[in-house]
Amino acid sequence: MKVPMGLIKKVFFVSIFSLLLSSCAGPTIEQYANEKPNLELSDYFNGKVKGYGIFTDRSGKVVKRFTVDIVCDWKEVDGVKTGTLDESFLYSDGTKQKRIWTIKQSAPNAFIGSAADVKGSAIGQSAGNALNWSYTLLLPVDGKEIEVQFNDWMYLIDSKVMLNKAQMSKFGIYLGEVTLSFQKE
């Protein structure tokens, strides 16, 4: 069966238009500027923080559960506020993972982060009670590392509780989400 060229063009343009619309969607950090309590990253992630999380696939099914213990410390290094977040993950299948973030405040409400399994730099901005990170994580899957893009949002609820929701994608295709609840000790 031969498909008419006009139909192919219509499907192509509708697909491109849908892709463009979906890439424009989503909140901006400025939308949270007046939200309280105000998030000071170096205040919240200082000392010990415990996290409880899940990873859901694109259908919403919980694929993994985990806890994370974070030991956090901030110092002034060469005039730059610099934090270390030492994360120890324990997954529901018994596997363990370690990630150590180094975060530098690059300007008021702007941050640059790095970790061994992050390709390049994580770029973050905060406003009001929210923080948004964008980065590429080298994710271990079946003995290989794949590059996965994260759009990571954190929301301070009160002085002790923060919620975190991170969307994962590859080549712009949605893979799933990580949802976390942090409790400051």
Image (tube, rainbow, N blue to C red):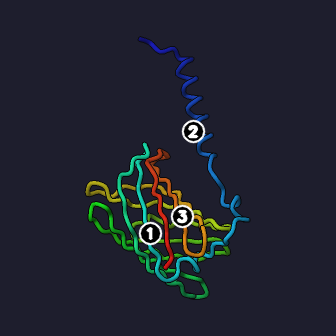
Q: Residue 46's spot in the image, x, y percent?
A: 52, 81
Task: Please give the residue where the numbered disc 3 appears in the rendered image.
Answer: 163
The vertical placement of 35 against 185, above or below, is above
- Tell me which amino acid carries mark 1: Gly
Which numbered disc, 2 or 1, marks the residue closer to the eye?
1
Label 1, residues with CA under 10 Å away: few <14, some 14-19, many ≥20: many
Amino acid on which the number 3 mark rests in the picture: Leu
Q: Which residue is mark 1?
A: 51
Q: How far is mark 3 from mark 1, CA to CA?
A: 9 Å
Question: What SS does tag 2 mark?
Answer: helix
Between 166 and 139, the one nearer to me in the picture: 166
Is residue 147 positioned above or below 129 on the image? above
Q: Please identify the quadrant where the N terminus is shown.
A: top left
Among numbered discs 2 and 1, the one appearing first in the sequence: 2
Q: Residue at x 50, y 46 (%)?
A: 172
Q: Earlier in the sequence, mark 3 or mark 1?
A: 1
Amino acid type, label 2 = Leu
Q: Residue furthest right?
A: 34
- Between the residue at mark 2 and the residue at mark 1, the CA separation in whole angstroms equals 34 Å
Residue 135: x and y in percent read 50, 61
Examine the image and state in which quarter residue 138 appears: bottom left
- Label 3: state its secondary structure: strand
In the foreground, 132 or 120: 132
- Does residue 59 appear to the left or right of 82 in the view shown? left
Residue furthest top in the image: 1
Question: Which mark identifies residue 19?
Answer: 2
The residue at the point 60 percent across, 68 percent down is: 156
Query: Residue sitting at 70 percent across and 58 percent down?
Result: 31
User: Counting other residues with Cα less than 10 Å from the Cα at mark 3, is it few (<14), some (14-19), or many (20 or more)?
Assistant: some
